[in-house]
Image: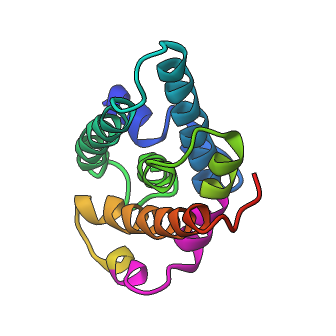
Amino acid sequence: MRFHKLIASGLGTGYAPFAPGTAGSILGIVLFYLFNYILNGLNIEPWPIIPLNLFAIIFVLLIGAYSIKKVHQIWEHDAPQIVIDEIVGVWIAIFALPFQWQYYLYALILFRFFDIVKPFFIKRLDRMQGDWSVMLDDMLAGVYANIALQILVHFNILEI
């Protein structure tokens, strides 16, 4: 059970006394940045980086969903200390964007905006019950943030 608590709480960031979701999101940004820093340092062709990122997102999503299922035996539904969903969501927000720290910062800000405000269908997903519903609203917030960033990058609206 300790392993599942560690995963579900985002290596303990979910226990932060203030804004545990933001703490988990920041951890997610740092981990994804380090992962991509290592991949870029290997001097491999750029094309495998996107599939490797996708694999990492799916892997953490599956491990996280399983850990959420396990901790629901002792924690309430979508307990504040569960932040693995924020980590997956912010990884989706930064997916397939240029490897520059500014984009990671924008992804964090936009993801938290969509996760907190919960526009469109995010609120509906947030109200659902079940182990997967904890993940789904944050995944959709990540998709919205990613779409917004892809548009900003494509049309050169962001000056980086």
Q: Does the segment drawn in magenta span residue 44?
A: no
Q: Is residue 15 above or below residue 147?
A: above
Could you say which is closer to the camera, residue 71 or residue 61? 61
Residue drawn at 40 percent across, 42 percent down: 8
Residue 20, image x and y in percent?
Answer: 61, 52
Residue 133, image x and y in percent?
Answer: 28, 66
Q: Is residue 73 left or right of residue 97?
A: left
Could you say which is closer to the camera, residue 148 or residue 23? 148
> Which picture quadrant has residue 5?
top left
Q: For the view shown, which residue lies furthest in the right direction?
A: 159
> Which picture quadrant has residue 63?
top left
> Which secondary structure class fits the magenta region best?
helix
Q: Is residue 122 left or right of residue 158?
A: left
* Quarter containing the N terminus: top left
Residue drawn at 46 percent across, 70 percent down: 144
**Residue 108 visible in the displayed image:** yes
Residue drawn at 41 percent across, 48 percent down: 88
Q: Is residue 52 above or below residue 111?
A: above
Numbered range of the magenta stretch: 109-124
Residue drawn at 69 percent across, 40 percent down: 101
Q: Is residue 32 left or right of residue 75?
A: right
Q: For the view shown, which residue lies furthest in the bottom direction?
A: 120
Q: For the view shown, which residue lies furthest in the top direction?
A: 42
What is the number of callouts on the image? 0
> Which picture quadrant has residue 33?
top right
Could you say which is closer to the camera, residue 78 or residue 121? 121
Q: Is residue 88 above or below residue 13?
A: below
Colour pattern: rainbow
Q: Is residue 17 left or right of residue 130?
A: right
**Residue 77 visible in the displayed image:** no
Residue 128, image x and y in percent?
Answer: 28, 76
